[in-house]
């Protein structure tokens, strides 16, 4: 159907659609800055709505894009693509195969407000897929704890070869990423590799206890933001981003993690929050931490948060692994779920965003094991990080016995039928607190060791 005619003003002359071309200039995954768009003679608000649009990482597309369908002043946005098989009008991306040249695509946004419209063009470059290489080592970002003045920043550890049990501190045991935004401390760093395997996003809790306002205040009025960095090689990192993901009723936003969901075509990002009633502005009402989630494609734009897991009592520190068509979720649970209290719970679901509330009967996530730590005989543990052994020898879940021995490497041959054990011989980094173990290639392992050596 043709667009409605634009309103006319004296002197009578037809309004002309506005076309702005944004050329490709950079080679790294970086945001494409919005250029000024001349105001149409009929509507300056429409020009502002068009100018506000951004296609993130347009000069080096390596994943699905967020193409907004709305802009300023209530304007609606519709997208077109010059190569819809490469980039669809809804932002799904099919990259060239490894060894092929990059593809150049023009995305056109048609911005409509009342009976007016303008067009804005983005010239984007789609990077070819990387070569697929085997995982032959492990990388471990973590924080060191509030006992140290610089402990609430991001540290790196690296495995000794393809051994998940023996590690070295990197960067002379000094932090590699430090926060200059929000509370200027970061905890619980989590790193996720893109499904194409050549982009990394690191998200962390915006929280500083050392020299801060204390745990009680932070649980009631803590940050509603996440701290985000991204990289293509684990060595060079973007500027820090301070992104609000929680609603105003949240008292904290702790221990974020992310899992790619191929059915959604988005990352599902999840964290724990205390939630308060809308009229409880002092956050004094009874509450407990629930697991929340939102979705994103680029870690710039997030959906509104929703409750993900609320069993009726406190849950924190969920981590997820995918195996055999199931998503397995490991969670630190502060209540009695089955036969064990204050334990680590293992559940599974075929739908990552399946929601559980106190009224869920039966629960949408199937209980696999509710006595993970009790069965092994440890004290209270938290901050689990789950990963598959590169050699195919089952699964590891590193968990932090915060009041005792620190991180402990729990092992099981299977997640569906777990048989947990602790090895007797292991040497983890010297001061790890809640972090992530990420399988890496031999090239990636050598690169981080060379960039952040230790004496």
Image (cartoon, grey):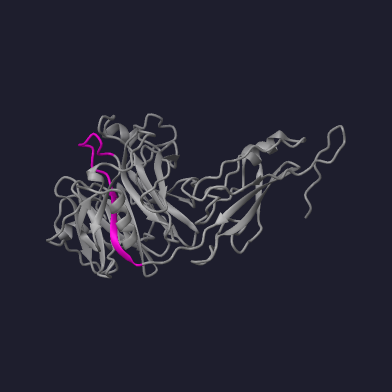
Magenta segment boundaries in residue numbering = 134-152
Residue 174 in view in this figure: yes
Q: Does the magenta stretch include residue 140?
A: yes
Residue 438 in view in this figure: no
Report the front residue among 413 and 329: 413
Rendered view: 213 above or below 143: above
Q: Position of residue 134 (x, y in %)?
A: 35, 67
Rendered view: 339 above or below 219: below
Q: For residue 213, what is the image quadrant?
A: top left
**Image quadrant where one finds the N terminus:** bottom right
Instruction: Say which residue appears at 58% left-offset and 50% top-offset.
Output: 67
Instruction: Say which residue appears at 41% left-offset and 30% top-offset.
Output: 281
**Position of residue 362 in the picture relative to residue 150 (left or right):** right
Report the front residue among 258 and 222: 258
Residue that protrudes farthest toward the left in the picture: 424
Rendered view: 376 above or below 174: below
Q: Where is residue 152 in the image (x, y as percent from the top left)?
A: 28, 39
């Amino acid at each position: 159907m043709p667009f409605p005619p634009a309103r006319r003003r004296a002197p009578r002359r037809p309004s002309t659609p506005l076309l702005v071309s944004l050329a490709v200039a950079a080679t790294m995954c970086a945001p494409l800055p919005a250029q000024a768009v001349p105001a149409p003679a009929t509507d300056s608000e429409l020009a502002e709505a068009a100018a506000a649009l951004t296609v993130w990482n347009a000069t080096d597309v390596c994943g699905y894009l967020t193409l907004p369908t709305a802009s300023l002043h209530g304007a609606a946005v519709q997208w077109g693509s010059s190569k819809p098989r490469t980039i669809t009008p809804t932002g799904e991306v099919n990259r060239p195969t490894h060894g092929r040249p990059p593809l150049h695509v023009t995305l056109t946004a048609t911005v409509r407000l009342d009976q007016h419209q303008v067009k804005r063009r983005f010239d984007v470059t789609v990077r070819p897929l990387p070569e697929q290489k085997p995982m032959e080592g492990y990388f471990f970002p973590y924080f060191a704890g509030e006992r140290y003045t610089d402990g609430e920043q991001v540290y790196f550890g690296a495995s000794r070869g393809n051994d998940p049990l023996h590690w070295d501190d990197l960067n002379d045991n000094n932090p590699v990423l430090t926060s200059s935004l929000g509370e200027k401390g970061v905890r619980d760093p989590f790193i996720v590799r893109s499904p194409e395997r050549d982009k990394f996003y690191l998200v962390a809790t915006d929280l500083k206890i050392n020299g801060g306002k204390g745990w009680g205040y932070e649980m009631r009025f803590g940050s509603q933001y996440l701290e985000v960095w991204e990289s293509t090689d684990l060595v060079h990192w973007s500027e820090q981003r301070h992104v609000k993901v929680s609603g105003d009723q949240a008292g904290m936003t702790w221990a974020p993690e992310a899992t790619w969901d191929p059915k959604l075509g988005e990352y599902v990002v999840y964290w724990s929050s205390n939630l308060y009633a809308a009229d409880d502005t002092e956050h004094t009402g009874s509450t407990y931490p629930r697991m929340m989630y939102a979705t994103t494609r680029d870690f710039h734009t997030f959906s509104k948060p929703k409750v993900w897991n609320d069993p009726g009592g406190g849950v924190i520190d969920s981590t997820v692994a995918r195996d055999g068509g199931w998503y397995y979720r490991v969670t630190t649970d502060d209540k009695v779920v089955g036969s064990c209290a204050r334990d680590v719970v293992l559940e599974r679901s075929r739908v990552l965003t399946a929601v559980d509330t106190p009224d869920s009967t039966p629960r949408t996530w199937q209980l696999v094991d509710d006595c993970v730590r009790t069965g092994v005989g440890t004290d209270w543990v938290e901050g689990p990080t789950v990963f598959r052994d590169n050699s195919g020898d089952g699964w590891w879940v590193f968990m932090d016995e915060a009041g005792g021995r620190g991180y402990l490497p729990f092992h099981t041959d299977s997640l569906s039928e777990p048989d947990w054990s602790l090895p007797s011989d292991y040497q983890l980094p010297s001061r790890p607190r809640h972090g992530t173990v990420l399988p890496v290639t031999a090239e990636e392992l050598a690169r981080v060791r060379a960039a952040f050596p230790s004496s």
